[in-house]
Amino acid sequence: MTVLQKLCLTCVSLLLTACTSSGSAIWDSIRAGVRPTPPVDQSTLSRDVSYLRLLVDGREVYLALGYVDDQPQGAVEVWYSAGREVLRLQGGRVVGTAGLLTEWRHVVLPELPAWRAMVGGHRWTRGRDVMPGYRMGVTDTLEVRGIPAPPDVKLTGFEGVALVWFEERAETMPADSALRLPPARYAVYVDEAGTETVVYGEQCIAADLCFAWQLWPTS
């Protein structure tokens, strides 16, 4: 099976019983003071379901792909935990969350160029509504550019695969320090046909709520 086949996202029915035995393992591990959940047995992951491997505070958990929502700026992948917390990704970037202590709602991204066109740098603006606190219309001016492969990433299983790495950092930050976010990083795989797939990302949705994720092939 080719790398592309392994990375291919499929729109599937939600199948979460294989992800974890706890009701909310993923976001329980995020919330401070909540008892850690046991590690996931990877052998229980279904070959018929697409997963994200999520790392939070050294813990490893999995989300299942619920469906893909076609949007003008690109498809939005909607991923679910066993407790039905939701993570929405568009082109590898977080564009929505639900069920967390911090939630992003109504995230607005422009139509961005291909990743390869942004290696030398690209400036763009993101809008987001943040809960709690009803902080609406938060605007981030960001710059994304190519970087050498970082030595400290948490990506696994892609040894020998050529990836293009990017860093995305804020050029201007909101006045509220709670809304200021550390830089994000992404790894992009480009196949022989030129199709780009973001296979790994590190992003924060609050100053104190950050995670790393990667596509997790089960076949």
Image: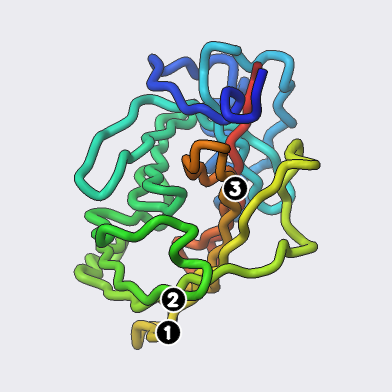
Q: Secondary structure at mark 1?
A: strand
Q: Find the distance from the CA under tag 1 to the CA under tag 3.
A: 23 Å
Residue depth check, mark 1 versus mark 2: number of the one nearer the observer: 2
Nearer the N terminus, badge 1 or badge 2? 2
Q: Secondary structure at mark 2?
A: strand
Residue at 62 percent across and 56 percent down: it is 164
Q: Are marks 3 and 2 in contact (CB under 8 Å)?
A: no
User: Dividing the picture into quarters, in which one does residue 109 lie?
Assistant: bottom left
| Residue type for callout 2 | Glu
User: Dividing the picture into quarters, in which one does residue 68 lie?
Assistant: top left
Q: Is residue 75 above or below residue 23?
A: below
Q: Secondary structure at mark 3?
A: strand
Q: Are marks 1 and 3 in contact (CB under 8 Å)?
A: no
Nearer the N terminus, badge 1 or badge 3? 1
Residue at 68 percent across and 14 percent down: it is 44
Say which of 144 and 211 sits in front. Answer: 144
Residue 87: horizontal and vertical position, in percent? 41, 42
Write down the residue under mark 1: 171
Q: Is residue 59 above or below residue 46?
A: below
Nearer the N terminus, badge 3 or badge 2? 2
Write down the residue under mark 2: 143
Residue at 24 percent across and 35 percent down: it is 70
Residue 50: horizontal and vertical position, in percent? 52, 24
Give the left or right position of residue 69, taking residue 54 as reference: left
Give the left or right position of residue 76, taking residue 185 as reference: left
Q: Which mark is on residue 191?
A: none
| Residue type for callout 1 | Glu
